Image: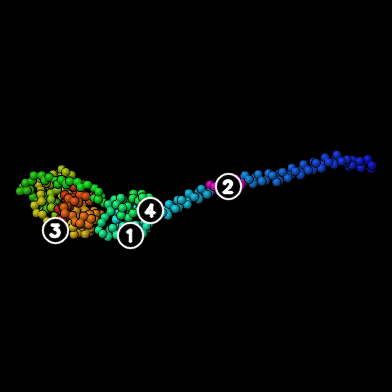
Amino acid sequence: MKELKSHFELDNRQRNGILLLVLLVLVSWALYFFIEPPQNDSNSRALNEEQLNIFEARIDSIQKLQDSLNQPKMYSFNPNFITDYKGYTLGMEVEEIDRLLRFRESGKWINSAEDFQQVTGVSDSLLAAIAPYFKFPEWVNKPKTKYQPFQKEAESPGSKSDLNTVSFEELMKLEELDQVMARRILDYRRKLGGFLDDRQLYDVYSISKEQVKQLQSRYTVLSKPEIKRIDVNKANASDLSTVPFITFDIAREIVNYRTLHDGISDLDELLKIDGITTYKLDRIKLYLSSNQN
């Protein structure tokens, strides 16, 4: 019994060694549980912050896209017709809008971006932002082109028949014409109320020069229909649009032009209207007059 007891007796050195070992174990556990986890949390936080930055960048891009979609789309416009509301949406001050309205009430017109700034007094930055959308009629700054009328070919009406009375059967006798073209010629004559000039044959859809020449060698306008020419200075846009080659948009441009220039004294001035060529003017003159009272 005495010998067994001796195995459990420890001296101070041994007890200190055991205590040191226990402390090392405890410190190791403490390092594992308290030092490693914070490192993992730090990496996790770093990762979360990186993801957060990506999410914020995406949100910002979506917000910018939404803001661009919410902004009203700007279309071209004539600054002479800016209203109070239009001026407000453009960012103009009340005083600037009032100056423009007073200027227009006096019967004057703005013909350039410089005129607009001089009249309204808008800032250079605002003018630079809205001036690219200004749209003035082509005839404001477009130089006048000299009109050269068509030269009529020498004709001998005595040997020709009337183009306004020719029948379908007579047209079919011409070698250059088929049934489709013969009907188109008669349909166009009916639409016009009768040809006023031989050159109007060129206006028939898809007709060739050879077909026109053969027609003109046999037929010419002998009995012109009675028409009342439309006064270009009095007719409204609807009436003007009934004239061949004048669409409703061109008719409105004509009305605007005569308003700006206090009337049209010479029909050649219509060449300043966008969409009217010398070819079209030659036909339009058959139905218009420029009488001014």
| Image-based side of 115 in relation to 223, left or right | right
Look at the magenta stretch and give its main secondary structure: helix
In this picture, which residue range is highlighted in magenta?
44-54
Give the residue at x 18% y 44%. 208
Q: Amino acid at mark 4?
A: Lys
**Residue tagged 1:** 98
Q: Amino acid at mark 2?
A: Glu
**What element does badge 4 sit on?**
loop
- Nearest-to-viewer mark from 3 and 1: 1
**Residue tagged 2:** 49
Mark 4 and mark 3: span between their CA atoms?
46 Å
Mark 4 and mark 2: span between their CA atoms?
38 Å
Q: Provide residue 289's location: percent of width, then percent of height.
A: 15, 55
Q: How are the residues colored?
A: rainbow
**What element does badge 2 sit on?**
helix
Residue 279 got which mark?
none
Residue 73 got which mark?
4
For residue 240, what is the image quadrant? bottom left
Q: Is residue 224 above or below residue 209?
A: below
